[in-house]
Image (cartoon, grey):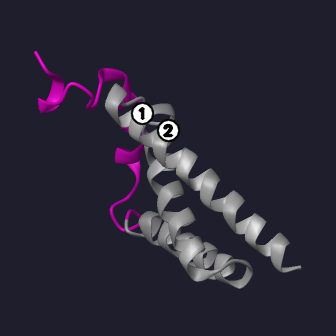
Amino acid sequence: EIPNGSNHGLTPQSAERIRWAHSIPYYIRPAIPALFNLLNSALRWASLLYIDASVAEMLISGLELTLSVVAARVIRKRMVSKSRWVGVFIVAVGVVVIERANNWKHQQQE
C-alpha cells in the first residue's frame, strides 16, 4: 500500500519527527512562516547589493528548490524519489555554473 497516496510521502518516522509542531500554541503558529519570509526577504535584498538581479534570482530560486528537498529528507525524514534527486542534482549543477559564470564575468571586467 502506498502511504498517504504517494510512494515518497510521509513515513511514520516523518510524522514522529514533526510531532513537536502540534504543541505550539495556535496564536504563535503564524509567526513561524512569517519569520522565514522576513529572513528570505532580507537575504534577497542583501544579495541584490552584491550581484546582478538576474543572477541573484536564478541562484535564489535554485537554492530554494535544492534546500527544500534536502530539508524534507534530513529534517522531516520524508522519502524522496530518485527522479526528484536527479532534478535536484541538475539544478545544483546549474546554480554552480551560474555562480562561476558570474564570477568569471566580473573578473574579466576588472
93 on left or right of 14: right
Q: Residue at x 44, y 52 (%)?
A: 65
The quadrant of the rendering that contains the C terminus is bottom right
The x, y position of residue 71, in whole percent, is 49, 41
Image location of residue 11, percent across then percent down: 30, 24
Q: Are marks 2 and 1 in contact (CB under 8 Å)?
A: yes
What residue is shown with label 2? 89
Q: Residue furthest front?
A: 108
Q: Which residues are magenta?
A: 1-29
Q: Residue furthest top?
A: 1
> In the image, residue 85 lies at what x, y percent?
42, 33
- As drawn, the label of residue 85 is 1
Which image quadrant: the N terminus?
A: top left
Q: Secondary structure at mark 2?
A: helix
Outermost residue, right side: 110
For the point 62% across and 54% down, the residue is 97
**In the rendered image of this protein, does residue 48 appear above or below residue 63?**
below
2 to 62, vertically: above or below: above
SS label for mark 1? helix
Q: Is residue 30 left or right of residue 106?
A: left
Residue at left offset 66%, top offset 76%: 47
Mark 2 vs mark 1, CA separation in Å: 6 Å
Side of 42 where 78 appears, left or right = left
How many neighbours does mark 2 have within 10 angstroms: few (below 14), some (14-19), or many (20 or more)?
few
Residue 42 image point, x, y percent: 61, 78
Q: Residues within 10 Å of mark 1 (few under 14, many from 20)?
A: some
Q: Is residue 93 left or right of residue 32?
A: right
